[in-house]
Amino acid sequence: MATKKYTVTLPEELAEQIRLKVGAGGFSAYVTKAIERQYERDQLGQLVTWMQEESGGPLTPEELAAAEAELKDAERHFDEPVAPGHYELPLAG
């Protein structure tokens, strides 16, 4: 990936803490990773907003409760011990 040098202003104490942690040579890589993570979070936020608009808004308390109940049921299914040599695979429905 091509790179380009930019000038940014950071709080001195934070920058020095990072430099001490990663060393002078790792500072740019650390900042790059932090910016990538923030960009991904921003993109995810846009996706959530779009999905809510497409589905009519955020989940209602009833929909959330139903989803949580379904998740708990699925967790119980996977927590059940399986007898040796006996495996049940869910069938596509």
Image (spheres, grey):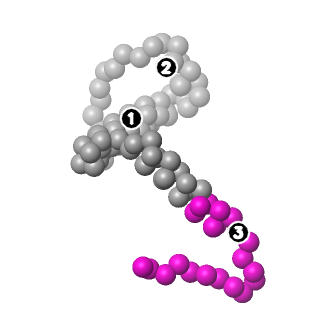
Residue displayed at 44% across by 80% down = 92
Q: Quadrant of the C terminus?
A: bottom left
Q: Is residue 83 visible?
A: yes
The foreground one among 9 and 85 is 85
Amino acid on which the number 3 mark rests in the picture: Glu
Question: Hey, which quadrant is residue 52 in on the image?
Answer: top left
Q: Nearer the viewer, mark 1 or mark 2?
A: 1
The foreground one among 15 and 26 is 15
Would you call the spot at circle 3 few (<14 residues within 10 Å), some (14-19), or many (20 or more)?
few
What's the mark number on residue 38? 1
Q: Are marks 2 and 3 in contact (CB under 8 Å)?
A: no
- Residues in magenta? 73-93
Residue displayed at 30% across by 29% down = 5
In the depicted structure, whether residue 90 falls above or below residue 22: below
Image spot of residue 12 (x, y percent): 48, 12
Distance (Cα) linking label 1 and label 3: 39 Å
